[in-house]
Amino acid sequence: MNSSIIQTIAIKNLNRRPVRTWCMIFFTFILSCSLFFTTVLVDSMKNGLEKTVNRLGADIIVVPKEYERNMADSLFLGELCSFSFDKSWIKPISEIDGIREITPQLYMKSLAAGCCSAETQLIAFDPQTDFIVSAWLSENNIKMPKFGEVIIGHLISPENPGEIRFFDRTYKVIGKLDRTGSNYDTCVFMTYETAKDIMGSERWYEAFYENPDAENLVSSLLIRTEEGADAKQIARSINYSLAKDSPIAAYTANGIMADAMKNVNNMTGYSTVLIGLIFILVVVALFSIFTITINERTREFGIYSALGTPDRKLSGIVLTEGLLIGLAGGLIGAVFAAAGTVIFGNTIVVLMEIPELNVNPIFLTVLGLKCIVLALVVSALSSLYSAWKVSRVSLDGLIKGEEL
C-alpha cells in the first residue's frame, strides 16, 4: 500500500463521516484563527508604539503634569487634545546641561461642525527652532509653511483640494505627508502665526469662550539631548530644577508611553495564555474524538491487516487523517482571519483603539503559514496515540473489534 493509496483511504474515511470531520476541523480552525488575529493585533500595537516613539524624534517631552496621559493617548491613539502652559518656561529649561535642542509645539483641536472641514488635531510649531516637523518636510520635499498655509497628514482629505477650513477661515494646503502608520497621519501642521489667526477667530471664541494669544502658549516642549547623554538623568534634572508647584514635568519619550507599553506587554501575556489554553483544549478534544472513532473502526483496520497491510501503514492512515484535518482547519482559519483583518481593518482599529493594523502581505502570509503548521502539529499530536494503538493490537483483536 503506497502513500497515494493511504491518502485516498484517509480522504474517503473523512468524507464518510462529514459531521465528525467538520467538528474536528472546527477545533483546528478556532486555534488557527485565534493565533492569527491575536498575533496581528499585538504586532500592530507594538509597531504603532515603535513608530510613534521613532517618529517623535525627541528624547524628552515636557507637558503639564495632569496631561501626561492625554499626551500619550494623543501620540499613540490619535485622540484629540488641547492643553497649554506659558511659553516663559522655555528659557530656564533650555539652560539645563545636556540639552542640545528644544522646540515648542501647541496642540489645538478642530470641531466636527460646519465651521471646520474635519475634526482633527491641529499642531503649531516654531520653524526657527523646530527639528521635528522640518525633518518630515525635508523627507517629503515640502517647503516650510508660511502664514495661512498648512501641511496635512496622509489620511486627511479636504473637500476642496488645496485648501482646508477651520473655524470659518480657509487655509492653503501646501503639502501632504507620506503615510507613517501613526497618529500624525490625521494631524494638521502650521506655524504659530497661523495658530494665532485660528485662535483669534469669532468661531473659536463661540466654541471655547476665549481668544488666547497663541504666541505665548505651549502644549509641549520637545527636547533633543546631547550625543551620549542620559535622557532619563536629564529629565530628572529638569524636574529637580522646577519648583514643586510648577504646572509642568519632564518625561522621556519612552516614559510617557510607559502605560501604553505596559498594556501591550500585558496583552502579549494574556494572548499567550489564551493560545496555550486553546492549544490544550483542541489537543484534548481531538484526542478524545480520534480515540472514540478509532475504537469504532477496529474491524475496518482488521480487514486492512488481513489483506496484508503492514502495521505502519495502518498507523499512516490515522496520521494522514489527522494531518488532513489540521491542514483544512489551519488553512481555513488563516484565510478567514486574514480576510477579516483586511476587510474589517478600519472597524478593528476603531474598536481596539490602535493607530493601524499590520496588513503587510508578506507578514500575513508568513503568519498564515505558522498558523497552518501549528494546526498540523496539534492534529498530529492528537492522532499519535490512536495511530500507535492501531499498530499494537493483534490481527485477531482487530477483527473481533476489541477496544483499542
Image: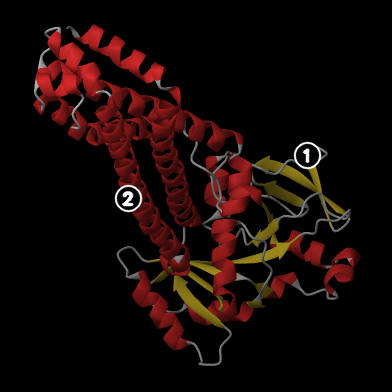
Residue 266, position as x, y percentages in the image? 40, 62
- The residue that label 2 is drawn on is 276
Q: How is the image coloured?
A: secondary structure
Query: What's the distance in space between the residues labelled 2 and 1, CA to CA?
Result: 53 Å
Mark 2 vs mark 1: give the one in front. 2
Closest to the observer, 261 or 389: 389
Determine whether, in the image, residue 273 is placed left or right of residue 22.
left
Determine whether, in the image, residue 214 is placed left or right of residue 31.
right
Q: Would you place residue 11 above or below residue 36 in this image?
A: above
Which residue is painted at 44% across and 81% down in the image?
238
Q: Are marks 2 and 1 in contact (CB under 8 Å)?
A: no
Give the secondary structure at mark 2. helix
Q: Amino acid at mark 2?
A: Gly
Closest to the observer, 66 or 379: 379
- The residue that label 1 is drawn on is 162
Q: Residue 362: in sight, yes or no?
A: no
Determine whether, in the image, residue 141 is placed left or right of residue 162.
left
